[in-house]
Image (spheres, coloured by chain):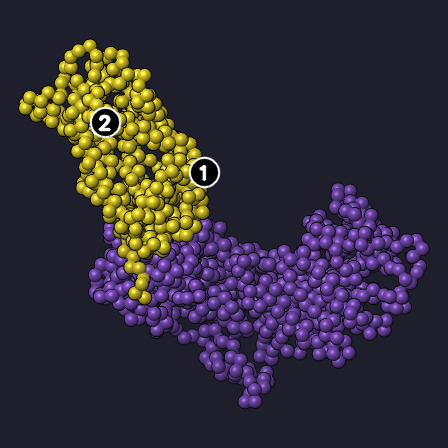
Chain colours: A purple, B yellow
Amino acid sequence: MDKKYGVYICTGCGIGDALDIKDLGGVAEEEGYPVKTHPFLCGKEGVELLKKDVADGTNSLVIAACSRRVNFDIFRFDGCVVDRVNLREQCVWSHPRSEFPALEEDQKDSTEYFDRLQMLAEDYLKMGMARIEKINLPEPYKLDTLNRKILVIGGGITGISAATDAAKAGYEVTIVEKEPHIGGYAAKLRKQLPVEDPYEDLIPPVIHSKIDELEKYPNITVKTDTVVARIAGEPGDFTVTLKKPGEKIEFDVPFPLPEEMKLDENGKDLDVEKQHELYLQYNEGRQDILTFDPNGEKFGAVILAAGWRPYKPEEGEFAHLGFGDSPDVVTNHQFEEIAANGKITRPSDGKEAKSVVFIQSPDKGDDDSDFAYAGSITSLVSLKQAKYVCEDYEDGKAYVFYQHMRTPGLSENFYKNIQQEPGIFLTKGSVMGVSKNGDGMIVEADDTLLGEKIKVKADMVVLGTGMVPVTADDPVVNLAYRQGPGFRDIGLFDGYCDSNFICFPYETQRTGIYAAGGVRRSMTIDESMEDASGAALKAIQCLESVNRGVSVHPRSGDMTFPDFFFQRCTQCKRCTEECPFGALDDDEKGTPKPNPARCRRCGTCMGACPERIIGFADYNIDSVGSMVKSIGVPSEDDYDEPPMRVLGLVCENDAYPALDIAGLNRLSWSADVRFIPVRCLGSVNVIWIKDALSQGMDGVFLLGCKHGDDYQCHFVKGSELAEIRVKKIGDALASLALEEERVAQFEVAIDDYDKLPQIINDFVESIEELGPNPFKGF
Amino acid sequence: MADKYLVEPDVEFIKDLQKLGGDTLKKCFQCATCSVACPISPDNKPFPRKEMIAASWGLKDRLVGNADVWLCHNCGDCTALCPRGAKPGDVLGAVRSYAITEYAEPKWLGKMVNDPKKLPVLLLIPVIIFLVLGLVLKIFGVDWLNFSPAGEEIAHSKFFSTWLVDMIFVPLSLWTVAIFALGLKRFISDIHENALNEGKTDKEKIDAVGFVKALGRVIPTILKHNKFTECGENQERATSHLMVFYSFIGLFIVTAIFFVVLYVFQIHGPYQQINPVKWLANVSGVALVIGSFLMIKERLAKTDETSVYKDWYLLGLVLGLGLTGMLTEMTRLGGAAGISYTLYFIHLVFVFNLFAFLPFSKLAHLVYRTVAMAYAEYAGRK
C-alpha cells in the first residue's frame, strides 16, 4: 500500500502538562512526518480532525495518546494502519514530574542533565513511527470451500444437547455414536439429579425427552455404531472419515513416530529421510495425513462430547476397603446398575441391603483426596444413591463418609433436602477400613464429626469412584495432524481435554474442536447440558469466523495470519513441532504446510523460526526489530553519565494490561525501560534480543504469563518456549562477553500490577550493577 | 481398635424428636456456630453442636442420659444465629421432652401427657376421682362432698371438704415424689456414665455429700435466674419465668402454712384479706396469671422458635391454674356462690393435673434441670 503518514499527539489527560509537546512533535517532524496536536483527540472535534485527514488520504496514523487498550474503537479507521503510542498510562501517569523532573532552562545544553520522561515519550513515538513504516493492512485468509456442518462426537446427554442447540440455531449437525443406541450413561440411571428449580428432588432421567426433542429436527443426522477414523483439514473444511467401531481401514489416522524410534543405536537423531521411512513402516496400511479421503464427509467444526467411562479400580487397589474381596463392596457405577434393575440387594446373596455405607475418599491418614476423577458430581451421586436406600426400605440407613462434600451452586438445595431424610447419616471422616462381620461388614472411621473413632454395620459398601474421560484412553478425535491424533500434553489435565480451563472453556488445543461434558471434567447432567450449549456456541463462532477469514479465538476477529517465505525454509520443523495448536503439517521433506484456519495467530512459529521467514502483516520480525532499533541509546558521548536502556518485551494478554493498570493507579517505575507489546512471549524471536544488545542496550527482559503445569499462557506454550529459547541465547551472550543476567524473564498475572514496579526496578538495578553494555556507542 | 464406638442410629428416635419440636434437627451442617453463640455452654465439650450431630444420627444413648441437654435454658441464642435454621435450642427442648418421658414410669402415662388427643382423658381423671370418692364416702355417711352448701358465707370447704382434698392430694404428692425418685436414680447414674464416656467429669464416682453440697451451691443461681439472664435473645423470658417461678414458691409456702394451721391449730379458711398469708397468696396468684400470660404472649411472638403441644399444655395448665384460683376467690368475695364453687372444682382439676403429671410434663424440668446443674457443679464441668 502507498502510505501517507500522519502523527497525532493528544495533549489531554495530563500529557500536555508533563511533556514538552513541541519537542516531541519535533522528533516526528525531523523524520518528515506531518504532526498535529489536539487537546482532546478522542473527543468529537479530535475525531473529526482525524477523519478529515483520513478522507484526505492519510492512511498510516501514529496516534500518540492513551493505551491501545482503550478507545480502540474510536481510533479505528477502515483501510488504515494505526499505531497507538502509549503516552498516557505508560509515560505521564506512571512517571510523575515530582519524581522525574523536567529540565531547567540552564540545564538543557549541559551533558550532565537529561529529562528521562521526555526521552521516554520521544522513544515511544519513534518506535510507533518505525512500526507504522513496516506494517501493512491484513488481508483475510479465505477457504476455497467452506462447510458449515457441525460434527458431534458422542450421542450422550452432552452430544444430544449440543446437536439440538446447534440445530435450533439453524446449523446442520451429524451425531456419531459408537454404541448401537444414543442416550449414553444418562439413559442407564434409575433417577438423576435435578435440572431445574427448586433443585431439590431426584427426577426421572431427562434423556428420553431430550431424544424425543432431537428427533424433531430434520437438520440432525444420527449415526450409531460409528466412530471417527480421522479428521483431516482445517476448521471450515474438515474431511472426516467415519467407520464402524473396531474396523481397520486405510484412512485410520497414522500416529507420529514415538520419540525412541527417532533415534539411532547411539541415541542420536536419525535423519529426516530415515525417520520418514520408519514412520511409513510404523503406520503401514494407513494413508499419510496429507492424503485426504476422497469419500470423506465435509464438516466445518467439531463438538467433542465423547463423555466418560466409570473408573475401574485395579486389582488390589482398594483392598483395605474390601473391594475385590467382598462382592458387596462395589463402585458407585455398579451400585447404580443394581439400583436401576430394582430394589437394592446384596450382590453376594441377594439379601436386602438396608444399611449401606458410601465412601468418598479412599485414603486414610493425611491424604484426604477423593477418588481419582471424582468431583462435586461424586458427592452428589453419593447423596442420590443414599436416597435410593431410603426409597427402597423404610428402615433403610445410608451413611456417607466424606472428606469433602461438594454441592456447588443450587445443588446445595439438593443437599439440604437429602439431609432431611431421617435414614441418611453424613459425616466427614477418614475411613480406616472395611472388615467382615458375619455375613455383613463393619466400616471403621476416624476423625468424624461425632467426635471419635466410630464403626458402623454395613450390608453394602459403595466407593465414590470417578468419571474417567474417554480421552484419557484414546484420542477419539483422531486428527490427521502432524503433531498427532489427540490433544497434546493431555496428561497435564489427567486426560481431560481443555486448553485453558478458566479462561477458555470448551476450547481445546485444536481450533475448531470444542469439548463439552464428561471429556472436559466430571460433571452432572445439568452441567453437561449447559456445557453443550457453550460448545455449540463456540462451534458456531468458529464457523462464523473462518467464513470471513479471521481468527476464532482468543484473538477473535484478527485478520492476520502467519505468512511463510518458503524459499528460505530449511525444513528444521521447529514451527511444526512448537505450534501449540498443531496448525502446521509438514510433508516428507519437512516443509511446513500451514493451515491458517487452525491457527490462533499467537506467533509462536515466528518466535521459533531460526530463518525468520514467518511473519504477520502487522507484526513481524522486521516491524518489532525496527522498533528496537529506533530506541535511542545514549552513550558517554552524549552525557557524562548516560542512563541505562532496558528493553521489555511484554505479553499483551496479561502483562501489558497490568502495566496499564499500574499506570492508572499512578504506580511508577524506571523511566529507562522501553516496552514493546508482543502477541505472546512465544512469538519473541531471539533476534530482537540480540539486536537490542548489539546496539548497546543494557538489558532485556520478557514479561509474560506463568508457565508450567498450571500455566496461564493464553497460547498454552508461549511463555514456556520463550524461557527455553532465552536460556539458549545465554551461551551466545557469553561468547560476546556479555553477562547472561542481562536477559531475564518474569511471570505476572493481570492482577499482579502492583508488583510490576518492583520487578522492573529490581531488574534495572541489577543491570546498573553490571554496568553499561560494552557495545554501547559502537 | 476395640475402643471404637459402634454407631447404631435409631431412626424412630429421630422421628420422635421431630414430633416433639425438633423437626429441624436434620438441617444441621455442623458449623458449631451454636456452641460458640451459647453464653452458658462450657468450654470443655461445649453443647449443642455435639448434641445436634448425635440427634441427626439418632444416637439416643448419647442424648437421653446427657446432663448437657438440661444445662441449656432454651434461651434461643443458638437458634437465632444458626445459619441453617436447625434451631438447636428447640432440638434440645425436644430431647429434654423425650428424656422426661423416658425417665418417668409408667411410660404410657407419659405418652398420654404428650398426646393432645388424650387431654380430655387427663382432665376427666380428677373429675372422676373427685366425684366417685366423694359419692362413695357419702354412701358410708361421710359427707365431704356437698353439692348444695348452706349458709350465708361462701366457704369452699363446705362444698368440697378439705379432708377430701387432702385425702386425694397428699397421696398424689407422694406418688409424684416416688416417680421422681425412681426416675432420678436412673437419671443420675446415666448422666454420670455419659459424662465419664465423653470426658466431661473428673469424678470417678458420685459422692452423695459432695453432690448435695453442689446442689446447695446452685440453688442461689436458680433463685436468681442467673443462667437465664446470660442469654442474649430471650432476656424478657427471664422476667416472666421468674414471676411464675416465684409465684409457685409463694403458693407452696401459703399451702404449707394453711396445711399446718389447719391440722395443728384447727383453724379453717378462708383467711381474712388483711392476713399477711393472704397477701402472699394474692400476690403469688396475680404473678402466676401475669407471668404465664406473658410467657404465652412471648411464645406467640417468637415465630422463629418452635412451640409444640408440650409447651402449650404446660402454659395452658399454669394459666388455667392461676385464673381459676383468682376467679374462685373473686367470685367468693363477690358472693356468686354457684360460679365460685364451679370455678373451685375446675381449679382442683387443674391442680390435680399439675401434681399428678408433673413428672411426665415439661414442668419436670424443675427437677431434672436442678439435678443436672448440681451434677455439672459437682463434676466440675466448665
Q: Is residue A74 above or below residue A738?
A: above
Image quarter in which the C terminus of chain A is found: bottom right
Chain label for disc 2: B
Q: Dot 2, crowdedness within 10 Å: few (<14), some or many (≥20)?
A: few
Q: Give the quadrant of residue B245.
A: top left
**Which element carries disc 2, helix, strand or loop?**
helix
Q: Give the quadrant of residue A446.
A: bottom left
- The reply to whether residue A74 is visible in this rendering is yes
Instruction: Give the residue displayed 31% in from the left and 19% down from the top.
Output: B275
Type of amino acid at the residue the image marks with label 2: Val
Chain label for disc 1: B
- Image position, residue B29 (x, y; %): 40, 50
Front one among A35 and A636: A636
- Image position, residue B179 (x, y; %): 21, 40
**Which element carries disc 1, helix, strand or loop?**
loop
Instruction: Give the residue displayed 41% in from the left and 69% down from the top.
Output: A243
Residue named by callout 2: B260
Residue named by callout 1: B232
- The reply to whether residue A310 is visible in this rendering is no
Type of amino acid at the residue the image marks with label 1: Gly
Q: Which mark is residue A255?
A: none
Instruction: Give the residue displayed 36% in from the left and 53% down from the top.
Output: B200
**Alpha carbons under labels 1 and 2: distance apart:** 43 Å
Return the residue found at the far bottom.
A265
Front one among A570 and A355: A355
